[in-house]
Image (cartoon, grey):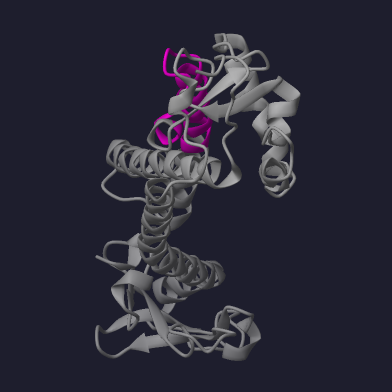
């Protein structure tokens, strides 16, 4: 039998990469689940029955930043506590049969385990080259291992049964790593399929809000003209300029007058979309309800592109 401290199999890049994928999957799924729950709580706890898109965007931005903060706290605890435990390994490392030790094969203390996690930032900010270093160094150390003076070895290294160490990358390890990678890609694909359309709709709503905002200064002129004359001002009256005078990167033109369908004075905003997308040429109407002194919003756009104030 070999001496426990002389026969050491250092974990190669493939086993370490497989463990990294598994741990990333666990933390990633937890992170997005947390964001989802925090988002629901934040929106449900918001005052009022609805929020405009600007307020909603601010709330979701705060939720995202809070989620990022909690993610890093959770990641530090995940790596620090597990790699300093009796297993000396995260769930991913345990699945691949490897563990973390100090330079002498001893279990890490909590301080060094957390320090190793912080040192891993060097491997991230070097565009993962710090992790790739493990494929070329004598003892398979990554950049953060050099900083923290740690090793990643087979789970049976530095034990009384070093002969049980796996000296080559087994098929099981490869299968586990590849399977975890495919799951991670699938999860990211699903999240992207949900997030990208949602983000697109959000940006479209923001553009509609900006366009409506351009028409807001005309409301006072329309209301004052109607109060004085009982009529609806057209472009060129009540200090209102021609339609194309209000053109911008979001607006093709703004017209005023009587909206025959409702019989109310209205401001008609014709949208412009530089990408000739769903907004281009579509219209939004701001109707003046004189008896109530209120402005109503309607549009021919799909509901998902409209801010909350135009959905009722």
Apparent side of residue 275 relative to residue 192 in the rendered image (left or right): right
Q: Nearer the viewer, residue 282 or 221?
A: 282
Q: Nearer the viewer, residue 183 or 97?
A: 97
Apparent side of residue 131 relative to residue 276 in the rendered image (left or right): right
Apparent side of residue 246 relative to residue 59 in the rendered image (left or right): right
Q: Is residue 111 above or below residue 267?
A: above
Q: What residue lies at 59% left-to-right and 25% top-to-bottom?
A: 8
Q: Position of residue 293 (x, y in %)?
A: 33, 62
Q: Which residues are magenta?
A: 67-93
Q: What residue lies at 34% left-to-right and 60% top-to-bottom?
A: 308
- Asked whether 87 falls inside the magenta stretch, the response is yes
Report how many numbered discs are placed on residues in the image: 0
Q: Quadrant where the C terminus lies? A: bottom left
**Secondary structure predominantly adopted by residues drawn in magenta:** helix
- Residue 196 visible: yes
- Residue 230 visible: no
Q: What residue lies at 45% left-to-right and 63% top-to-bottom?
A: 199
Q: Position of residue 205 (x, y in %)?
A: 44, 68
Residue 12 location, quadrant: top right
Apparent side of residue 57 relative to residue 306 in the rendered image (left or right): right
Q: Position of residue 178 (x, y in %)?
A: 42, 55
Residue 107 location, quadrant: top right
Q: Nearer the viewer, residue 153 or 119?
A: 153
Q: Position of residue 105 (x, y in %)?
A: 60, 15
Q: Is residue 293 above or below residue 250?
A: above
Q: What residue lies at 49% left-to-right and 46% top-to-bottom?
A: 169
- Asked whether 265 falls inside the magenta stretch, the response is no
Q: Is residue 157 above or below residue 205?
A: above
């Amino acid at each position: 039998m070999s001496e426990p401290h002389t026969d050491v199999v250092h974990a190669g890049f493939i086993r370490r990469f497989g463990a990294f994928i598994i741990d990333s999957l666990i933390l990633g799924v937890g992170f997005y689940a947390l964001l989802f729950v925090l988002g629901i709580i934040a929106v449900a706890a918001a005052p009022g029955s609805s929020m405009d898109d600007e307020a909603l965007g601010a709330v979701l931005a705060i939720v995202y930043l809070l989620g990022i903060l909690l993610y890093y706290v959770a990641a530090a605890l995940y790596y620090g506590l597990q790699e300093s435990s009796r297993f000396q390994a995260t769930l991913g490392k345990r699945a691949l049969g490897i563990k973390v030790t100090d330079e002498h094969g001893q279990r890490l203390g909590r301080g060094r385990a957390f320090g190793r996690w912080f040192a891993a930032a060097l491997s991230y900010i070097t565009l993962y080259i710090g992790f790739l270093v493990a494929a070329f160094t004598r003892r398979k150390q990554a950049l953060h291992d050099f900083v923290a003076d740690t090793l990643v070895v087979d789970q049976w290294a530095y034990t009384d049964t070093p002969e049980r160490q796996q000296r080559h990358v087994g098929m099981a390890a490869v299968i586990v790593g590849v399977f975890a990678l495919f799951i991670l890609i699938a999860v990211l694909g699903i999240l992207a399929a949900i997030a990208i359309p949602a983000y697109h709709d959000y940006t479209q709503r923001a553009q509609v809000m900006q366009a409506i905002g351009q028409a807001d200064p005309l409301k006072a002129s329309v209301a004052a003209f109607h109060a004085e004359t009982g009529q609806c001002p057209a472009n060129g009256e009540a200090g209102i300029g021609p339609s194309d005078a209000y053109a911008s990167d979001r607006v093709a033109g703004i017209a005023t007058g009587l909206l025959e369908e409702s019989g109310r004075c209205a401001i008609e905003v014709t949208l412009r979309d530089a990408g000739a997308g769903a907004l281009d040429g579509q219209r939004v109407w701001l109707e003046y309800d004189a008896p109530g002194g209120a402005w109503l919003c309607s549009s021919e756009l799909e509901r998902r592109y409209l801010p909350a104030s135009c959905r009722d």
